[in-house]
Image: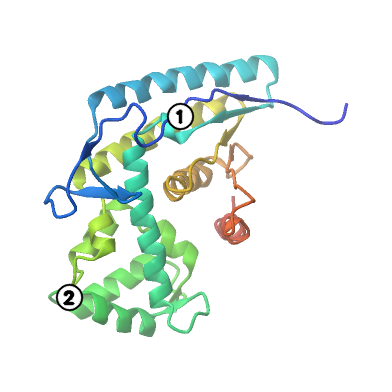
Amino acid sequence: RSGIGGILDYAAEADVGADVTISTASADSDVPTTTRSNQALAREYSYQTERQCDANVKIFETAIRAVHGVTPDGFAAIKVTALGNPILLERWSTALREIYKLFGRMDVDKDGMVTFEEFTNVWNQLFVGDSMEIIINDMFKRFDKKGKGFIDPIAWTTTLDPPLMRRLAGYCKKQGSFAQAVLTTDEEKLVKSMQSRLRRLVALAADLNVRLMIDAEHTYFQPAIDNLVLSMQREFNKNTDCVYQTIQCYLKDAKTRNQLFMDQARIENW
């Protein structure tokens, strides 16, 4: 009577260090690593983890069908860490954070927009390559698809997928934190597998008119989770509210992130 309903949440999730294959490496090792809490962790992704993620998809599908059977317009909740290796999520999140920092560096006058002049000036400071003028023009057009003459934060964060991030890192003059954070080609394949699992669940929920809520998780995973959720919302929220994002409102950046997501939905019309 009061409009209060339930959410079916199968709480399958994982964290770095929990039932995940990790090997310790020295900070000077040539092995690509990710670091947290002053520990260097080699990036290893076991087939066992991938098989478990595939099994979790089937369980989530059962939960979605259960919601449809009991409350057809109800909610099912899922956790992205059940669909992909948490080490990979942390690696991808690190790369995305470095991308956000790069936008802030390019936004010289701090007006929230990067003009072609700002983009060119900072590019020449940080990147190198042959035919620089052609590369700069090509890169800017990738972000400024509508030809507005500037890049906004939404265009910046949504255009830079893992392959483009890797290409950008290849132009870096110095192999700093951004270049080191970019995913390898093998990691990109695993990201696509994760995206495929999530899309399979969202497509099922959409077919059954079940609303799907993607849980927020540890902050060191969240940028990657946000990226995944936004890609699903663009595809499935055009005509209905199928995919829901979760924002932890006790975090300092919650208001800014919420405004960014709302602006994105308004601009892209979903």
Residue at (36%, 62%) from the top-left corner?
Answer: 98
Name the quadrant containing residue 88: top left
Q: Is residue 47 visible?
A: yes
Q: Secondary structure at mark 2?
A: loop
User: x, y (%) of residue 67?
Assistant: 63, 20
Where does label 1 land, which residue? 13
User: x, y (%) of residue 207?
Assistant: 55, 26
Q: Secondary structure at mark 1?
A: loop
Q: Amino acid at mark 2?
A: Val
Left or right, 196 with respect to 263, comes to: left
User: x, y (%) of residue 1?
Assistant: 88, 26
Q: CA distance from mark 1 to mark 2?
A: 41 Å
Where does label 2 land, which residue? 128
179 or 158: nearer the eye?
179
Residue at (40%, 58%) from the top-left corner?
Answer: 97
Q: Amino acid at mark 1?
A: Glu
Name the quadrant containing residue 140: bottom left
Instruction: Please determine whether, in this image, residue 46 is positioned above or below residue 65.
Output: below
